[in-house]
Image: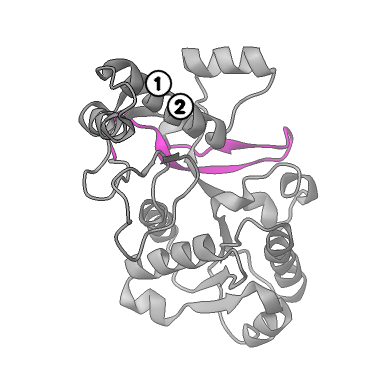
Amino acid sequence: VISTTSTAVRQTEIPSRYVFRTSPTDDMTARKWQDYLDNNSARHLVMLSDSGDNSEYSQSLRTELENVLPTSIKAQSYNCDLSDISLSLNELEAQPVDAIVLIPSDDRDYIDQALSFVDRFESRYNGTPLVLGGDTLYNSQQVLERISQNSLLESLVVAVPWHRGQQPTAFEQAAENLWQSAINWRTAMGYDATQLLITAAEQITPCGNDVQSCRDAIRDSILADGLDGGATGDIQFRNNDGNRQVSESSRISVLVGVNLAERTFECLEGESCAE
């Protein structure tokens, strides 16, 4: 199995050595956020996550961000659940806010609650805090279409596993020609997962009806060779957990901002996809 969208940091060892992930894990996103917050001198954070039935991603990313925050900033930060944003807004009344970090799970209701929090915060309080979001907010229909000019959400910065380059690669251009639309990170991660399996299957010695030998051979090939020149860069995996290793040639874990005129996201200056 090669997952293309799973990012949550596993709290226990995976039960199988046959599971891989092309997406980077949440600890990488947390470090990316921490650098951004530090560069913008943000000291008082509000982190909004949820505890719904599908909250593993939300809880994982919040935990990883807390793990990399300096003790002084974590002590001045406020955590709240998206299930009751009215209560959270009331509790923030006397607190300074330098940044709002939105970490909803992939649920339309929670995404809407996260966006509503920012709208209601803006209508009640002065100031222009930074607004950061997890990759569940990388959704043009639900997110971009409700952002208005000069609103706090116009400055939304989203952390995504991958983003198309300002100078498209041959693959990106070919994909855009095929689909008549620019591809997103889910498509790119899925393409690389497919190529990994195809390449490994082509390289192994035919193993007939011995299914276990085939599984082992494909796994060993993926671990040994990975994938060179994938849509998201070169890919290698860690042997102990199947997570993706970070290589200098990979364009993964990047920050994107809102281009309101085009109703799309674009890579922030200084990110690898802006080169």
Q: Quadrant of the C terminus?
A: top left
Q: Residue at x 35, y 31 (%)?
A: 250
Give the vertical position of 201 relative to 131 (above or below): above
Q: Quadrant of the N terminus?
A: top left
Which residue lies under the disc numbered 1?
A: 198
Q: Nearer the viewer, residue 236 or 160?
A: 236
Q: Marks 1/2: CA distance?
A: 6 Å
Q: Residues within 10 Å of mark 2 (few under 14, many from 20)?
A: few
Q: Are marks 1 and 2 in contact (CB under 8 Å)?
A: yes
Give the vertical position of 198 relative to 223 (above or below): above
**Residue 194 tag number:** 2
The amino acid pointed to by label 1 is: Ile
| Drawn side of residue 12 relative to residue 131, left or right | left
Q: Residue at x 73, y 56 (%)?
A: 151
What percent of the width, then of the height, locates residue 261? Answer: 74, 35
Magenta-colored span: 246-271
Asked if residue 268 lies in the magenta stretch, the reply is yes
Q: Secondary structure at mark 2?
A: helix
Q: Nearer the viewer, residue 209 or 178?
A: 209
